[in-house]
Amino acid sequence: MTGGISINILDMSTNGLSSDEIIEVRKMLAQQIKNARSNSRHKKCMLCDQVGGFCNSHTIPQFCLENIAWNGKLNSFDTLIDSALLNKDSGINNAGIFHIICRPCDSKVFQDYEKAGAYEGVPSEAAINQIVLKTVLRDIYKHETEIEMFEASKKVMKEKSPFLSFFVNMMLEAQINARSTDIQECYDIFNRAKDFLNTHESWLRIVSYDKLNFTVPIAFQGMVALITGVHGEVINNIFEHNGEYKMEYLHIAVFPLKQSTAIILFIDANCTRYSQFEKYITETSLENRLEIIGRIIFLYTEDYYLSKQLDENIIKYLQEPAKIIHDMATFNPRRSIKKAVNEFDLRRHNNIPNIFTKEHAISFEQEV
Ligand SMILES: [Zn+2]
């Protein structure tokens, strides 16, 4: 229902609510999301400046989602949160959509990356630049809507419980500030990717490209500010709020194809803090690399889509990291980076199952 809008600061437990009340809260939530979307609406297409007429842009290419969908349905982060307030699954047409560019731009600008043939071998510079552009457009849309949601929650809280509102206000303010910084960084990345649209040069460097000969049960594209890698080093100090300090993002694409999968990691070629991590990723075995990529996706992100064929038991294990993200809503900004490095050390999370194995591959025969 949230369509990828991260509202995990809100309490999603429904203990003590009657089924009528749950329906009411669901309606209220849907209305709030609708209002937030309309309040954060852009006037012009982000790519060509034409006024109005936005289309439904998809982040992950449709052909990838189709390969893992079951009767047009997918599981998402909301499925893992398992709340009666959220939908249990997502329709392929609603997965990862945003509305800030026009139809002509959507169908023209992303052609290199939105075709299965682009992943026969290492994808072109144009393709990975377009992946970044689409990811960042989705993130801008998402964070701008989230800010509107938090602003609306502030108002509701003030009216309903003035006593509580001081603390809730502080928490919401912290969230709004964090999202605003994210948005600024997104705009920088957006401008960079847009500048490189019609050139043959690249500002990105591929860290790893793996092609598997089976279809993995997950589709993902996104960017992550890794806190640490596998050596206890600080890659991004997320508590550093000095304007000079820039987050460095790792871009990830997991594209399930017919009987194969392309998995690509890449970074801005000017990144300076990923060298240890990059060395590990390129030198370790394929199995270790895929395991680490899976841990990053489940520990840091919520924009992935999962096949409904994925075993119930696996889903249970994936709920734990999803809940860590959920709990990050109460993130204390004064918590030390040392503690965060320890918590996010990718070596630690060996309870996250590696779903990039043949054992979990999509079986196309079972399709109805
Ligand atoms: Zn346009």
Image: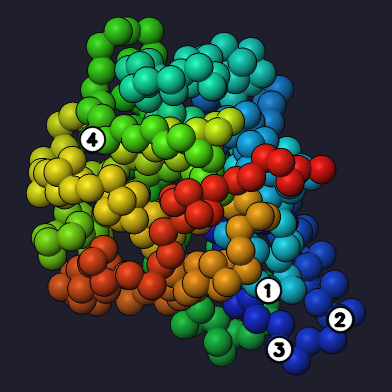
- Residue situated in front as seen by the camera: 186 or 291: 291
243 sits left or right of 302 in the view: left
Residue type highlighted by circle 4? Val
**Residue carrying label 1:** 83
**Nearer the N terminus, badge 4 or badge 1?**
1
Residue type highlighted by circle 3? Asn
Residue at the image position 72 percent from the left and 63 percent from the top: 88
**Measured Cα–Cα span from mark 4 to mark 2:** 49 Å
Q: What element carries label 3?
A: loop
**Measured Cα–Cα span from mark 2 to mark 1:** 13 Å
**Residue carrying label 4:** 207
Residue type highlighted by circle 2? Ser
Q: In which quarter of the image is the N terminus?
A: bottom right
**Residue carrying label 2:** 19
Are dots 1 and 3 in contact, CB under 8 Å? no
**Measured Cα–Cα span from mark 4 to mark 1:** 37 Å
Residue farthest along the top direction in this orientation: 199
Are dots 4 and 2 in contact, CB under 8 Å? no
Residue type highlighted by circle 1? Ser
Residue at the image position 89 percent from the left and 79 percent from the top: 20
Image quadrant in which you'd find residue 153: bottom right
Q: What element carries label 2?
A: helix
108 sits left or right of 236 in the view: right
Q: Residue 265 carries which label?
A: none
Q: Where is residue 159 in the image (x, y as percent from the top left)?
A: 67, 77
Number of the front mark, 4 or 2: 4
Residue at the image position 54 percent from the left and 67 percent from the top: 314
**Residue carrying label 3:** 15
Residue farthest along the right direction in this orientation: 20
**Measured Cα–Cα span from mark 3 to mark 2:** 11 Å
**Measured Cα–Cα span from mark 4 to mark 3:** 45 Å
Can you say whether 249 is above or below 202 in the image?
A: below
